Image (cartoon, grey):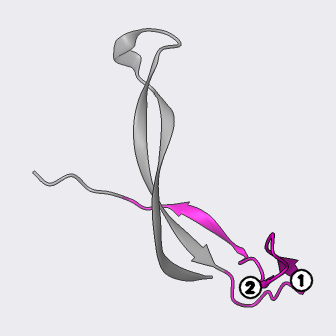
Amino acid sequence: MTPTSKLRFVERGILAPEYGDGWHKTGHTLQQWWEDRNIVLAVHVEDKDGSPLPPPMRGEWRDVPVEKEA
């Protein structure tokens, strides 16, 4: 797996004990796309006009550990 420069934020519910049982707040998590260059998909994809598009990439989104500065 190779890291790429693709980044995104996703919203997730985070359990927050200070709010009581079953309560949560929404938090943002930074993720990075990791591409698997060892897998080649032999898929022919076309856009709405019939022009060929590159094959879809294989990989996964992984959470990026973020530290807070003091």
Q: Main secondary structure of the magenta part?
A: loop
Q: Which mark is residue 54?
A: 2
What residue is rendered at 45% in x and 66% in y? Answer: 7
What residue is rendered at 14% in x and 54% in y? Answer: 69
- Type of the residue with mark 2: Pro
Left or right position of 49 against 11: right
**Callout 2: SS:** loop
- In-front residue for pair 40/68: 40
Magenta-drawn segment:
36-65
Quarter location, residue 50: bottom right
The stretch drawn in magenta includes residue 55: yes
- In-front residue for pair 67/61: 61
| Dot 2 or dot 1, earlier in sequence | 1
- Type of the residue with mark 1: His
Q: Position of residue 5 (x, y in %)?
A: 45, 77
> Which residue is tagged 1?
44
What residue is rendered at 39% in x and 59% in y? Answer: 65
Q: Position of residue 29 (x, y in %)?
A: 43, 49
Left or right position of 29 against 2: left
